[in-house]
Amino acid sequence: MFLKDYFVTIYKSVGSLLKGMKVTGYYFTHPKEIQTQEYPDNRATLQMFDRFKGEVVMPHDENNEHRCTGCQACEIACPNGTIKIITKQELQPDGKKKKAIDTFVYHLELCTMCNMCVTACPSDAIKMAQTFEHSVYDKRQLKKVLNAPGSKLMEGVE
Amino acid sequence: MALFLTISFSSIATGIHTWLAGTMQNEMLVKITEMAIAGISLLLFLVPLCFFLGYMERKVAAFMQIRLGPNRVGPKGSLQIVADTIKLLLKEGLTPTASDKFLFNLAPMIVVVTSMLVMAPIAFAKDFQIWDLSIGVLYVSSVSSIAVIGILMAGWSSYNKYSLLGAMRSGAQIVSYELSVGLSLISIVILTGSLRMSDIVMSQENGWWIFKGHIPVLISFVIFVIASTAEINRAPFDLAEAEQELTAGFHTEYSGMKFAMFLLAEYINLFVVSAIGATLFLGGWMPFHIGHWEAFNHIMDFIPSSLWFFGKTFAIIFIIMQFRWTFPRLRVDQLLTLEWKYLLPISMVNVLFVTVMAIMGWHF
């Protein structure tokens, strides 16, 4: 009984070792399985994944209109004070005043890409971009204003 | 082309010998000059070999892990190892204050010299051998065990707990696995009836031992590859330098060129072990011959003997490298269980089978 177990152990372990070597041998003989992306060389064709979060951007349409109502939900949601929204009172055509954004300040150097501002936004005004080459020599260049100059709120977004 | 095929390593060696004997009258002087030439050419062979093995290891590792490996320095990254060597040469060779300075500086030399000494009886090509001594196999197995003294010395003199632990592990490992290596070498010695390397190669003229010796020799070849992987401290048996537990084991305190010496010795050992395995089990420089198929054997003879030797050696090196990048490291108790409960009893029974086979003449 003992001898049987002994040889069964040897047989099984040799089998499992050969199985492992088959896997590495397969990868060695099939270079097309290689996952490495040669980054600076393939910059032109580089495809980032959808789930990759590089920085917060505010999309504008062709009429230079954005969807941000200035509700400051993102500013409250942000855990480390990355977003600062400065609002102003805009005069509507019917004479009423309405709250609108003046500047949407985004501090990239503080951002941890946690995505909480995007989930908090009720009107889908901001989203995460896939850019990642953010390095600059001066820290001040990382403070960004997300709303384009002269832009205004899109019609129908409350 | 025909001229190229007729020139062999042995004819170059004989040519140099004749020329030296003609120019120098003193026979002693001729011997000394030849020894110097052999030593220098061995060094000139080993350094590029270690560069190549380092490059090969990194590329093999990369491809097995679905990576690309070094590909920036030189074409396909082939000069990466040269750059690394230059970096090591320029680094400071630090000696810790509390260490035993004499032993600390002596240890890397002993390790390198030991691994170079084992190169002596290896037949690189037909009639091309540094020293064809009559106890070749015994010499190899005894000299290679001196390396453990160098490792213990390095661990002890470093005055560092990790170094000491690594050295102690290495001592236990090398002492145990030497038994299996010895017993698997003995099975070939029994079949050949000689310890001389050239006799062992010539005995495989009608077929390599791995084919002629049936299953027992196949088993001893497998045991040889496993046990010698353990003996040269390579993964999965790299407990001596297990970097997750012991930072770098016995060479934790070494830097610069002294560290490079350990690296050099590791790759020379890898080559030596594979060359010994290729000589004993796969016929060394002997071309692939099948019994009395004269025509087939003659065609095989056209491939130079050095190519046969290096092809077989690098095949074994590749297998050992594949071990490293496939298997996880063993624990100390698993390591000793494998040797004392599995490899040693199996190889002892195996030697018995080989002896019966040799006495009854059941091999080809």
Image (spheres, coloured by chain):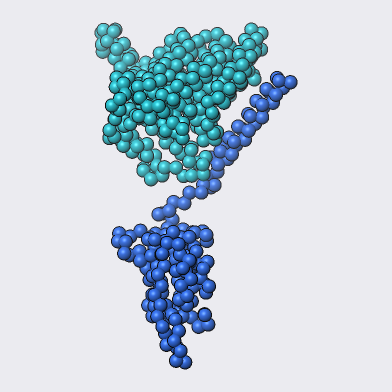
Chain colours: A blue, B cyan
Residue at x 56% of width, y 38% of height: A24
Percent across and percent down for residue A21 are 58, 35
State whether residue A6 appears in this view.
Answer: yes
Side of B95 where B171 appears, left or right: right
* Residue at point 25%, 8% (across, down): B25
Q: Quadrant of residue B188?
A: top right
- Compared with residue B174, is residue A58 higher up or lower down, i.e. above or below? below
> Is B364 in front, or is B222?
B222
Where residue B351 appears, x then y in whole percent? 61, 13
Residue B298 in sight in this render: no
Placement of the N terminus of chain A among the 4 image quadrants? top right
**Residue nearest the viewer, comparing B74 with A156:** A156
Q: Percent x, y for residue A52?
A: 49, 59
- A35 up-or-down from B15: above or below: below
Viewer-closest of A56 and A62: A56
Number of numbered markers = 0
Q: Nearer the viewer, residue B203 or A112?
A: A112
Residue B281 image offset from top left, x and y in percent: 55, 20
